[in-house]
Amino acid sequence: MGICGHLAVPGKCLVVLGLKLLFLVPAGVPARSGDSVLKDNITVRQGDSAVLKCNVDNKVSRVAWLNRTTILFAGSEKWSLDPRVILMENTAATEYSIKIQNVDVHDEGPYVCSILTNKKPKSTKVHLIVQVPARITNISRDITVNEGSSVNLMCLAVGRPEANIIWKHHSPRGKPQGTHKFVMEGEHLELTAITKEQSGSYECIASNDILSPDVRTVQVTVNYPPFISKARSTGTPVGQKGVLQCEASAVPRADFEWYKEDRRLFNGLNGVKIENQEDYGNYTCVAMNTMGITNASIILYGPGAMHDVNGAAVLPRCSVCLLLTVTLIYLLKF
């Protein structure tokens, strides 16, 4: 289709041809004597408005704004079909400016204000640069792995200027914040021989100093065998219920079993009824999950004794009233 087929206003074919011949200087052709070429860059954020200014005087006979080879305005007459492009009317008499509203990346490029004065063309060239805030387009899903495995996390982002990506690690809830916390740069984060301390949330932060950074999170869960962190008993007289406590750190969550010598106790988690002297003695807490199994042995004494896995017994009449031994038996295979 020819030039006339793209006109916003019918009957302007000859005028368009005249403007193109009058105003445009093909690329690579040296500027003629009398041409005044001014170069300028205008930088705006995506979604904002851009104002392109052009200074004129009372000697100007014709003036137009062009984007590459497309005429936007000729004088006060609009030629562009884009409703976002408007002529700035409340400006000084020596200014011929247009505004592009809601700027997008396809608006980036060269703009020319062509002026004809005393039959000698001049032009003001403006290059519009559109900045785009950083935005994360793809990120790894939440993942669950076994301790000792390798993990590769990915985070892709776009932006103009190019987005910078950093990773931050945050410890799981219940653990001291800041422990094993680090900052790494790059789209890919590789964790080799991962440990339980490296579980938690991994933040991908994409930024290019345009608006606020884009932040998304990947949750990394590390399975590991039980580790008994607390095992204790309380001194209990005959006829009352003795309390046995056993706590373990594990992922998945540990299941517990209690044994008296070689006999399994189904009510061990709720306490042990001390009916006679034979109920005192060695009790074993067994913690297990799909990753492994471990146990802790507790000796239940009479009144006045209390002990846990982290400290010595506090006794009024004896020096040692609780023996605790933690032994790793074997790893279960499922």
Image: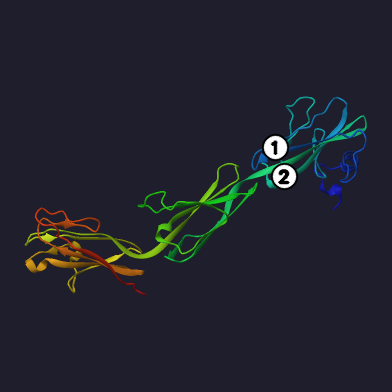
Circle 1 sits on which residue?
Answer: 50
33 or 94, nearer to the observer: 33
Identify which amino acid the numbered label 1 is placed on. Answer: Ala
Badge 2 density bin: few <14, some 14–19, many ≥20, Cα 10 Å: some
**Residue 78 located left or right of residue 294:** right
| Residue at image point 59% right, 49% down | 164
Q: At which x and y percent is residue 189?
A: 53, 58
Badge 1 density bin: few <14, some 14–19, many ≥20, Cα 10 Å: many
Identify which amino acid the numbered label 2 is placed on. Answer: Asp
> For the residue labelled by badge 1, is the local secondary structure a helix, a strand or a loop?
strand
Quarter of the image with the C terminus in it? bottom left
> For the residue labelled by badge 2, is the local secondary structure a helix, a strand or a loop?
helix
Residue 162, numbered label? none
Query: Which quarter of the figure has residue 236?
Result: bottom left
Q: At which x and y percent is residue 173?
A: 37, 52
Report if residue 101 is visible in the image: no
In the rendered view, tell whether residue 121 sits above or below residue 206.
above
Count of labels shown?
A: 2
**Residue 158 located left or right of residue 258:** right
Kindly report the distance in space between the C-alpha atoms of the residues bearing marks 1 and 2. Answer: 10 Å
86 or 24, nearer to the observer: 24
Q: Are marks 1 and 2 in contact (CB under 8 Å)?
A: yes
Query: Which quarter of the figure has residue 102?
Result: top right
- Colour mode? rainbow
